[in-house]
Amino acid sequence: MVISGEGEFYPRRYFLSNSMDSGCKYSSPTKKARTSAPSRSTERKHEKKYGVEDLPDECLYEIFKQLPDNRARSACACVSKRWLMLLSSISMDEFDRLTSSSDESMSSDEDQLFEGDGYLTRCLEGRKATEVRLAAIAVGTGGCGGLGKLIIKGNNTLRGVTNFGLSAVGHGCSSLKTLSLWNVSAVGDEGLSGIAKGCHMLEKLDLCQTSSISNKGLIAIAEGCPNLTTFSIESCSKIGNEGLEAIARNCPKLESISIKDCPLVGDAGVTCLLKLASGLSRLNLQALNITDFSLAVIGLRGAAITNLVLSGLKHVNERGFWAMGVGQSLQKLVSLTVTSCRGVTDVSIEAMGKCSNLKHMCVRRCSSVSDRGLVAFAKAARSLKSLQLEECHRFTQSGIIDALSNMTAKLTSLTLVKCKGITDIDVEVSMLSPLESLRSLTIQDCPGFGSGSLALIGRLCPQLKHLNLSGLYGITDAGIFPLLENNEAGLLKVNLTGCWNLTDITVSALVRLHGGTLELLNLDGCWRVGDASLAAIAEDCLRLNDLDVSKCAITDDGLAVLSGAKQLSLQVLSLSGCPRVSSRSVYSLTKLGKNLLGLNLQDCNSIGSSTIDLLVEKLWRCDILT
């Protein structure tokens, strides 16, 4: 649970009672100092009475160090901002133990309050990210189980978080295990060093757009936080190889590393991580100035890597990816994602397919790969279960079919997104083996993919359960029918967003053939679909719980028929942008709303505000978007 706030504090009366018990004199800073009554003698002067608030910081510092537990410290922090800031600057290990007799009387429960186990999460975002809030968290969370996770996002230009605030967390939150700093420009090496000095249990560090943090701060973390397992930096312009080398040498438990858009990071830092972090299982390298050498080291030293993401590596050529694939070390690699890398060619992608345990492959915006490389990869990657190809324009329908024919054993999911090279061609289906293992097919925004290609896919993939054809405006009722008719497994989820050539004929056939299994149907933007489709859904769909008919030609009459379905129990219904749905549908929507958890009525301009208010009142369990 994420909670934004200052932590737990205790009433000032707690401090008063404890102070009197311990023999301390206390004067409330909110009361005016009393002056003695005027003397008859004019020679006697008025004397000022001093209170605790008048003591210098050095004295208060020594007093605060004697406070017995976190409750007392929290109570003191409520007195004034000065006391809060002073308390937050005291490290937990600086608080002196009481006398031996007091130690013996301290219960085990109080010991736990003092130490803290790191149960709490605090998130400071935007204007809430202030020094005062951070100091309050540092002082107040100890008595609530201890701070375990801290997230700070964005700059507060007036009173934003600085090194002092982060150092306060280091002083008071020894239980901290996760720290995320995003776009906090006023925090630098000093603040991160404060965390390193006090938070030795830190396991996860995430730095994004922290322009003031350099290698010095990272070295401090490396030396003070040996339990670090997850490390992520993004757009950190002052962090380079020296900081990464320190992390590699001092943090033997590293399991996950992500480095994005850090211009000072090169081969030396990456290779040092790979050589020393023997337990590294997840590696993400994006937009870095590394070369073929780093990828060759991945192929030789990445024995524990299971998930690998490589993106925007402009200085890595075909040789680097080839060396990574043939290095024989990536035998545990399960998932590989490559984006915008010109070094991915037909030769290199074939080599990457030789990773024997590879199950998930994603290739995005790699313009040098063609059908030849895809087919060679398919032959080499015998364990592949999921293949995703995005914006790779040299793939054709023939290449996709040939690749699929070599993946008949285990492939369960195929995704093609914005591949403009795929166009309809005549292929003899009888020469091809059916892909019985494929359960999920996504073909999205591929403008050349028409009815011919769809019919071919339908005959090759009879066991589909999830079908996503969003953005294929070229397909027709006649083209999609063979896919629906040849399916033997029963479709569970169908997304036809933006297929504006489809009509009620397709929907009627879909629910007639698969109404017994269909759970989700998205017809957003199918403007030729109308009330006949709702009537078919009401009659034939038994398990449908999510229906989207946004920007369709449905009317109040269609909704009335839908609401009368006895077996239908929709949980999510979207009617966004349906101008012919009006306030007349209030009864139908109320009837449907008995089971609804989500209802989208955005841009339904014919539904009045009074009707919306009535629906909100009656459908109190439902989240209504207007």
Image (cartoon, rainbow, N blue to C red):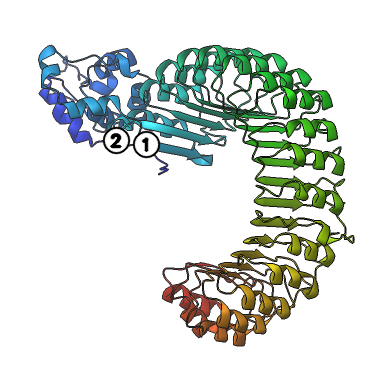
Residue indicated by mark 1: 120
Distance from Cα at disc 2 to Cα at disc 1: 8 Å
Q: Is residue 361 visible?
A: yes
- The answer to whether mark 2 and mark 1 are in CB contact below 8 A is yes
**Secondary structure category for the residue under label 1:** strand
Q: Position of residue 579 (x, y in %)?
A: 67, 78
Q: Is 491 on the left-hand or right-hand side of 343?
A: left
Q: Which residue is rendered at x = 77% and y = 27% of the image?
A: 321
Q: Residues within 10 Å of mark 2 (few under 14, many from 20)?
A: many
Three-letter amino acid code at the position of disc 1 = Leu
Q: Quadrant of residue 77?
A: top left
Q: Nearer the viewer, residue 171 or 242?
A: 242
Residue 530: percent from left, percent from top: 68, 81
* SS class, disc 2: helix
Is residue 366 in view? no
Q: Amino acid at mark 2?
A: Cys
